[in-house]
Image: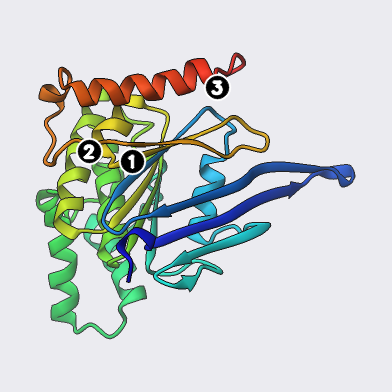
Amino acid sequence: MNKDKFLQLENIHKTFKLPGGKEYKAVVDVNVNIRKNEIVSIIGHSGCGKSTLLNMIAGLDAQSQGHIILNNKEITGPGPERAVVFQNHSLLPWLTVYQNIEMAVKKVMPNLSSAELKERVLHFVSLVNLDHAKDKLPGEISGGMKQRVGIARALSIKPDVLLMDEPFGALDSLTRANLQEHLMRIQQSVENTVIIITHDVDEAVLLSDRVIMMTNGPEATIGEILEVNLPRPRDRVALQSDPEYIRCREAILDFLYKKFAKHDD
């Protein structure tokens, strides 16, 4: 398999039907190949179709035109090879941290023995450093810890692609920074592809191998794709004075606030 053509979006259009027979063209003519084991951020102003694109890749919504192909198979609906983490962690409040992850694994891997199941769940609990909280209910842990459970649950089903819709957007800046570090470390460990929607320029540069910049909607499309040529592992403090980090940050800011400034955001 061509590593550069792991996930292909070909001529993607999405039109929503409105009352009175009108149509809203949310996304038009999106073409991109996403590589195996890379982290890609999608950034743009509100209403530029970021979440619409993510939902189509997840199979939660169908494109009006075009093809989305993962591992040479067309995406026609949700599947275990893609996992989604939303800003709202959506944990089941009556289940413990361990049980929330266990439930996902049981659903996708029903043939595991009880010993294999336990080993797998504990592995992903440890991966997000929540061994001490595995028996706690969601209501007993912090927002950042809940989001770590959401990430562990998503990764526990061994998806080829992890889709994240502003996963850290509701968190304070220190918790957000901590989770960004977790995500980079985990992605290096499990080697899957991550697509993350963000409004945060620094987050996009810190996390990503490439940043997809969307033009404004309606009829939003990919405006530019920025290659982030920074080695891993990445140190956020050292990066602040790194010429490549500064170049990438300035390129995104220029795109968002000069080329495609939006005055009603």
Image coordinates of residue 198 in percent, x first then y, are 40, 34
**Which residue is drawn at the image coordinates 10% and 53% (left, top)?**
131
Quadrant of res 60? bottom right
Which of the numbered marks, if any, corresponds to residue 260? 3
The three-letter amino acid code for the residue at tag 2 is Leu
Of residues 89 and 240, the one nearer the viewer is: 240
Which of the numbered marks, if any, corresponds to residue 210? 1
The three-letter amino acid code for the residue at tag 1 is Arg
Q: From mark 2 to mark 1, how far is it between C-alphas?
A: 19 Å
If you read the primary sequence from the N terminus, does the residue marked by circle 2 or circle 3 appear first? 2
The three-letter amino acid code for the residue at tag 3 is Phe
Quadrant of res 108? bottom left
If you read the primary sequence from the N terminus, does the residue marked by circle 1 or circle 3 appear first? 1
If you read the primary sequence from the N terminus, does the residue marked by circle 2 or circle 1 appear first? 2
**Which circle, 2 or 3, is nearer the viewer?**
3
Dots 1, 3 in contact, CB < 8 A: no
**Which residue is drawn at the image coordinates 55% and 22% (left, top)?**
260
Which residue is under mark 2?
179
